[in-house]
Image: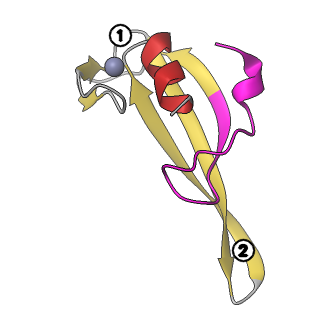
Amino acid sequence: MSKSSRGKRVRHLGPDWTVQQVAKRSLSGDETEPCSQCGTPVVLREPHHRVDVARDVDLMGRRLRSEHQQLTFCDADCADDWLGR
Ligand SMILES: [Zn+2]
């Protein structure tokens, strides 16, 4: 995983989405989320990879705010595969 992912465009989400951060994290709680690449359920309490993406929301020709989204991946390989799509 290289830091050069930051700022990379994520065209499969939409034209304006870019990567903000790729990080290994573990969260509190008992929830699972499907890996965005392979669909395997990821236990959020256990270390896994998260990719933060954001886009500027443009309304009436003015940049109003950033919209953020966090995606869950089981490991660095899935995150890399997804980013390289
Ligand atoms: Zn996966």
- Disc 1 under 8 Å from ligand 1? The reply is no
Residue 26 visible in this rendered orientation of the protein: no
**Which residue is at a point 73% across and 32% down the rendered structure image?**
6
Q: Quadrant of ligand 1?
A: top left
**Which image quarter: residue 41?**
top left
Neighbor class of circle 1 (other Cα within 10 Å; few <14, some 14-19, many 20+) is some
Give above or below for 38 relative to 55.
above
Examine the structure image and report whether residue 19 is included in the region drawn in magenta: yes
Amino acid type indicated by mark 1:
Glu
Q: Which region of the structure is painted magenta?
A: 1-21
Left or right of 71 in this view: 7: right
The residues tagged by marks 2 and 1 sit, at their Cα atoms, a distance apart of 35 Å
Give above or below for 76 relative to 64.
above
Examine the structure image and report whether residue 2 is included in the region drawn in magenta: yes
Residue 62 visible in this rendered orientation of the protein: yes
Say which element carries label 1. loop
Give above or below for 17 relative to 46.
below
**Image quarter in which the N terminus is found:** top right
**Disc number at residue 46?**
1
Provide the major secondary structure of the magenta segment.
loop
**Which residue is at a point 55% across and 30% down the rendered structure image?**
83
Give above or below for 56 relative to 42.
below
* Percent coordinates x, y for residue 57 in the rendering: 64, 69
Mark 2 or 1 closer to N-term?
1
Left or right of 52 in this view: 43: left
Q: Which residue is mark 2?
A: 64
